[in-house]
Amino acid sequence: MVKLRKFSAYQRLERPYTRVSKFSAENFVRGGYPNIKVTKFNMGNTKKKFDCTLKLNVCRAMNIRHNALEAARMSSNRLLEKSVGSNYHLLLKVYPFHILRENPLAAGAGADRMSTGMQKAFGKTIGVAARLRAGQTVFQLGIDKANVKLGREAMKRAIKKLPCSCKIVVE
């Protein structure tokens, strides 16, 4: 399996998947849209109204990869499922739509025949990310007042999987 590139290369918010060229035919994005790893956005009991709402907000504006979102979702959902059954509602409120690219440069013997260097360096798609503003809610958890402590623990587990500092807001 191919090793993921360091996230520091994609952390900053930049112009979303656009290419600027002096030739208008080369401005649009070619290539496939990679599959996102997030399988569910709505988990638990979606019909019941809960007493307490916990929100996980990011502290600064940044991109978050789809595999980090899925890891955070799985870890918090697993704890909630084992402890309270289906007596909660966990909602992932962001959608990863920003396409991440890299332009791998070949090195070694014969590399000049395989690579075009930095000419038309738009790159190949390697994944997708969600673009977040400062203070934006990533996860929202509806839970009964008796299980708020457990809900906070589930949110703390999700924070450990995300590449940024977050805070938990109880409403």
Image (spheres, helix red, strand yellow):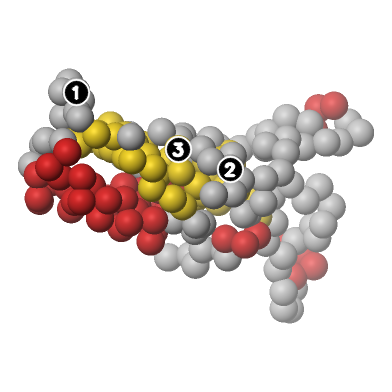
Within 10 Å of the Cα at label 1, are there few (<14), some (14-19), or many (20+) other Cα atoms?
A: few
Find residue 49 and name its label: 1
Within 10 Å of the Cα at label 2, are there few (<14), some (14-19), or many (20+) other Cα atoms?
A: few
Q: Is residue 128 above or below residue 93?
A: below
- List x then y, in percent, for residue 166: 46, 52
Q: Amino acid at mark 1?
A: Lys
Query: On the rendered structure, is 35 left or right of 45?
Result: right
Q: In this orientation, does residue 85 appear?
A: yes
| Residue that appears at 15% across and 23% down | 48
Q: Nearer the viewer, residue 129 or 23?
A: 129
State if disc 3 and disc 2 touch (CB < 8 Å): no
Label 3 and label 1: CA atoms lie apart by 19 Å
Q: Nearer the viewer, residue 116 or 129?
A: 129
Dot 2 or dot 1: first in sequence order is 1
| Residue named by callout 2 | 134
State if disc 1 and disc 2 touch (CB < 8 Å): no
Query: On the rendered structure, is 90 left or right of 101?
Result: left
Residue at the right extreme, as displayed: 22
Q: In this orientation, does residue 36 appear?
A: no
| Residue that appears at 51% across and 57% down | 164
Q: Is residue 1 above or below residue 152?
A: below
Dot 3 or dot 1: first in sequence order is 1
How many marks on residues? 3
Q: Amino acid at mark 3?
A: Thr
Query: On the rendered structure, is 77 left or right of 5?
Result: left
| Residue named by callout 3 | 137
Q: Amino acid at mark 2?
A: Ala
Q: Residue 133's image quarter?
A: top right
Q: Is residue 23 above or below residue 4?
A: above
Q: Secondary structure at mark 2?
A: loop
